[in-house]
Image: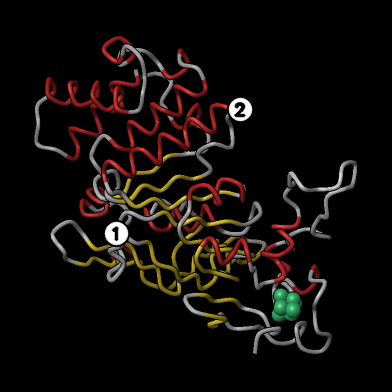
Amino acid sequence: MRNDTRPLLSVRNLRTSFFQDEGTTKAVDGASFDVFPGKTLGIVGESGCGKSVTAQSILRIVDRPGRIVDGEIVLTRADGSEIDLVKLKANSREIRSVRGGDIGLIFQEPMTSFSPVHTVGEQIIEAVLLHSEVGKKEARLRGIEALRSVGIPKPERRIDEYSFELSGGLRQRAMIAVALSCNPRLLIADEPTTALDVTTQAQILDLLRKIQQERGMAIMLITHNLGVVAEMADDVVVMYLGKVVEQGKVDDIFHDPKHPYTKALLQSIPSIDSTPRLKLPTISGSIPHPFNRPKGCPFHPRCVSAIAGRCDVEEPPLQAVGEGRKASCFLYP
Ligand code: SF4
């Protein structure tokens, strides 16, 4: 049964900006969404739409000169208490207990995420020691178990290897083992399969699904790959230029997209029914430079349905366009 009455994580009106000499970049500009226990939320959009900065904001690891300027990120902890992560100091003991403890993170490229001078085991053991009151021997046993649970063969031996000694698929599995070593209730997966070949991609997605079923964990899946979202997600948030432009259930978004940007993204996926040798439709233009945000609807310079005199002047609010669905577009009054 779906336990969706109370979100595990509730992001409200999140704004994260980067303050540079050249100007201010609004990387996340008023994003709101919920992640429910045991469910997968897919966050999709092109590169530069604010997906990864949203994840970094949740974990309070936004690099300077960036900072959260407004909003709430409310996490319901295991004991039922609520905590607003925005109010915590980025290096406080409390946020460090949330990182890895309540929320695990896996990155796109494990090669650059693992330390090359420490073994995989040392990095898992460090995470276990930080979040659990166990000794080194028990932490090592937990590390071996974590590697075994993600399907790494001979984990007793692999735990003493360095990340560069593992293949791409095994490295990503080891990264998942590090993220899961402290039993987080939410896993943020930032483009977890982008750097992998398709066979390994499918294996990693199967693994994530299996782990989710076993542990009842929520997943926030950040990707530009709509195929991955269709396979994995229950709910979808579509972002464009730091804003949420559409959100809803995965079936609704895929079968009846409302926002012209979501429609264009879906049309650009190859389908088995596509006419052979016909060019796939693309979205004309590119995401505007962040210092040069267009006035009005942020998508209007690329939108085939733009209404002259309105879309280039006013900004559409994100509003209900059906049961459990929202979109920000003037086509839906
Ligand atoms: Fe296109 Fe206008 Fe809708 Fe923006 S508000 S997506 S420009 S139709």
Residue with the mark numbered 1:
89
**How far across and how far down the image is residue 82, in percent?**
21, 67
Residue at numbered disc 2:
197
Q: What's the residue at 45%, 45% (across, down)?
A: 189
Q: Is residue 263 visible?
A: yes
Q: Residues within 10 Å of mark 1 (few under 14, many from 20)?
A: few
* Quarter of the view holding residue 104: top left
Quadrant observed for ligand 1 in the rendered image: bottom right
In the rendered image, residue 230, in percent from the top left (x then y), is placed at 56, 51
Q: Is residue 109 left or right of residue 149?
A: right
> On screen, 246 above or below 144?
below
Residue type, label 1: Lys
Where residue 308 is drawn, which disc sits there? Answer: none
Q: Residue at x 58, y 56 (%)?
A: 44
Left or right? Give the position of 85 relative to 193. left
Q: Earlier in the sequence, mark 2 or mark 1?
A: 1
For the N terminus, the quadrant is bottom left
Is disc 2 surrounded by few (<14), some (14 to 19) or many (20+) residues within 10 Å? few
SS class of the residue under badge 2? Answer: loop
The picture places residue 3, in percent across and down from the top left corner, at 27, 64
Which of these two is toward me, 17 or 208? 208
Residue at x 46%, y 71% (from the top left corner): 32
